[in-house]
């Protein structure tokens, strides 16, 4: 049964990541934390997210805003070591609680049409937060999603710039995680099993991005985020 859950999680999350540029870690990480040890869940997420970003980078490079990308990367370099420190000091129950609260708060802000002006300094700050969240909980997406949505960034630019940033941040975070926290056979066996599902998701996600109405898709994303965050919140509170 766990294999079925794992397969469904990976397939849906990869479709979201391909079609929006941010969905994989937000959807996959909370449920992977229910199936695996935190370090294993985060490393599986990091590896598979890197594969998706690498596979898509040639298709979306024309949509990348290289100025913002550069500032995000510079900011993330500061956040990466902070994040691994948080990961090493935080127990699993608190980790789940933090992830759930981030997801719920993010979704509420997006539904209320949170708005913010894009500035160079804010690009650096968002990059730092993303780097910190990547090595700590494997989720660089929340601050990027909130920031880009709040600045009314076009969906093509959002997807292209975030996927390019993920290519860097996931690779660096995976190296840091494996080096400092160690790794297991489970990480690489599970990741290998998930690869066929990832490529199915890549194909399906491109179709979704091309054909689905933007408003309808946003509503689906809100529902998935709220269900994911709410479920993980209940699960983490039951462990106290």
Image (cartoon, rainbow, N blue to C red):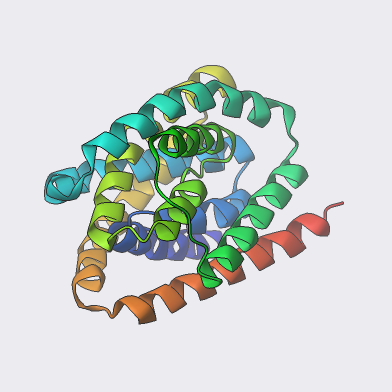
In this view, the residue in front, 119 or 190, is: 119
Classify residue 235 as left or right of residue 43. right
Question: What residue do we see at 45% from left, 29% from top?
Answer: 76
Question: What residue do we see at 40% from left, 56% from top?
Answer: 151
Question: What residue do we see at 49% from left, 34% from top?
Answer: 125
Q: Position of residue 52 (x, y in %)?
A: 29, 47
Q: Is residue 237 in view from this perspective?
A: yes
Question: What residue do we see at 45% from left, 70% from top?
Answer: 221
Classify residue 96 as left or right of residue 153. right
Classify residue 107 as left or right of residue 23. right
Where residue 237 sits, quadrant-wise, is bottom right
In this view, the residue in front, 30 or 128, is: 128
Please, which residue is most extreme toward the top here? 179
Q: Position of residue 45 (x, y in %)?
A: 45, 44
Q: Is residue 171 in view from this perspective?
A: no
For the image shown, how many numbered marks are present on the structure? 0
Above or below for 147 versus 11: above
Above or below for 192 versus 208: above
Q: Position of residue 138 (x, y in %)?
A: 52, 41
Quarter of the picture holding the N terminus:
bottom right
In this view, the residue in front, 208 or 51, is: 208
């Amino acid at each position: 049964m766990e294999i079925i859950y794992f397969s469904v999680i990976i397939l849906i999350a990869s479709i979201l990541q391909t079609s929006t540029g941010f969905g994989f870690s937000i959807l996959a990480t909370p449920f992977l934390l229910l199936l695996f040890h935190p370090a294993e869940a985060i490393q599986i997420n990091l590896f598979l997210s890197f594969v998706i970003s690498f596979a898509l980078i040639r298709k979306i490079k024309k949509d990348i805003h290289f100025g913002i990308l550069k500032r995000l990367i510079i900011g993330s370099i500061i956040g990466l070591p902070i994040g691994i420190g948080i990961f090493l000091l935080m127990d699993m129950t608190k980790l789940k609680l933090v992830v759930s609260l981030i997801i719920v708060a993010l979704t509420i802000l997006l539904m209320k049409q949170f708005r913010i002006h894009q500035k160079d300094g804010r690009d650096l700050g968002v990059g730092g937060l993303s780097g910190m969240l990547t090595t700590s909980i494997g989720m660089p997406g929340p601050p990027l999603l909130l920031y880009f949505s709040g600045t009314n960034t076009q969906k093509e630019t959002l997807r292209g710039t975030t996927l390019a940033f993920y290519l860097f941040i996931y690779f660096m975070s995976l190296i840091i995680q494996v080096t400092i926290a160690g790794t297991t056979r489970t990480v690489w066996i599970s990741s290998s099993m998930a690869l066929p599902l990832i490529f199915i998701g890549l194909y399906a996600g491109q179709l979704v991005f091309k054909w689905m109405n933007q408003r309808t898709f946003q509503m689906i994303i809100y529902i998935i985020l709220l269900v994911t965050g709410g479920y993980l919140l209940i699960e983490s509170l039951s462990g106290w």
